[in-house]
Amino acid sequence: MNAIRVAVIGAQGRMGAQAVDAITEAEGLELVATLGSSDSLESLLEKSIDVAVELTVPASTEANVRFLVEHDIDTVVGTTGWDAEKLSGLEELLAKHADTAVLIAPNFSIGAVLAMRFAELAAPYFDSAEVVEIHHPRKLDAPSGTANHTAQRIAAARNDAGLPPVPDATEIDPNGARGAVVDGIHVHAIRQQGMTASEEIHFGSSGEALTIRTDSHSSSAFMPGIVTAVRSISDYTGLLHGLENMLDL
Ligand SMILES: NC(=O)C1=CN([C@@H]2O[C@H](COP(=O)(O)OP(=O)(O)OC[C@H]3O[C@@H](n4cnc5c(N)ncnc54)[C@H](OP(=O)(O)O)[C@@H]3O)[C@@H](O)[C@H]2O)C=CC1
Ligand SMILES: O=C(O)C1=N[C@H](C(=O)O)C[C@H](O)C1
């Protein structure tokens, strides 16, 4: 069987550089292009790319991914910054490229993917739910893509179960101490030197609490998820939001 021909976009970044190594070492994958911010995406078109891995910055990712879809290249995206409007625009574009697939993965770590699933399962059983994310201080966006995705999934599970809004008597909060609110779920972002990525999901009801925590101590946590996604994306078409869609979770 022919190797899957892979391009990494954002190849000099923290994630991109590790992805280059992981793809180079992975059986059945062939790294054929590495692009940085000063390279043109057009250079990919002569290289018969099967899968692009997009690991850049929130300001660039949408244009990059749209270019790749327009040229029918399956794409695995780790970059954050994909709000509902960008996702729905991408879905519309993918509808015109029926054989092409894009995975937008807020988090490639299996621990984080499982934590989000556990949170979704727990959500209907608790009155209160809040998300706390902790990242390195170089991170450009807050709340993290993972925290947004977690909050959205908790909110959807609560909504499906017919739960009321989370209880909260706060009337005075001039400095935003209650955090961001994503689909009715409060999300708190900490930036801490020495950290890579962690998330805690706090649930509470009368007399009890459940806390789910996931920690990624280094970017190596994200590499098996990237390799899995690159290997399997050709089995899909359209937009997949979350690695869980490839893991039967
Ligand atoms: N899904 C997941 O599991 C994970 C996702 N992330 C996300 O991945 C993204 C990247 O993170 P990280 O590697 O830490 O960030 P870095 O800042 O280390 O790397 C980003 C890289 O993208 C490059 N870049 C910027 N614009 C373009 C462009 N238009 N074309 C090509 N390359 C470009 C930058 O180049 P230059 O320096 O020259 O500008 C830089 O090398 C972030 O959104 C982060 O949140 C991070 C970890 C895990
Ligand atoms: O910027 C990071 O580092 C990370 N970004 C992703 C996010 O925003 O959720 C994934 C992981 O948390 C690391």
Image: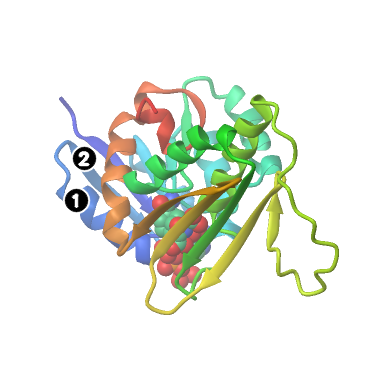
Q: In which quarter of the image is the N terminus?
A: top left
Q: Which residue is disc 2 drawn over?
A: 29
Marks 2 and 1: CB-CB under 8 Å? Answer: yes
The answer to whether residue 161 is left or right of residue 3 is right
Numbered tag placed on residue 153 in the rendering? none
**Residue drawn at point x = 17 percent, y = 44 percent:** 26
Q: Residue furthest bottom?
A: 193
In this view, the residue in front, 84 or 99, is 84
Q: Establish if 41 lies above or below 246.
A: below
Q: How far apart are marks 2 and 1 (CA)?
A: 7 Å
Displayed quadrant of residue 247: top left
Q: In which quarter of the image is the C terminus?
A: top left
Residue type, mark 1 in image? Thr
Q: Residue 238: x and y, percent?
A: 52, 25
Q: Residue 87: x and y, percent?
A: 63, 38
Numbered tag placed on residue 24 in the rendering? 1
Q: Residue 157: x and y, percent?
A: 60, 31
Count how many numbered circles sit on residues in the image.
2
Q: Establish if 208 lies above or below 142.
A: above
Residue type, mark 2 in image? Leu
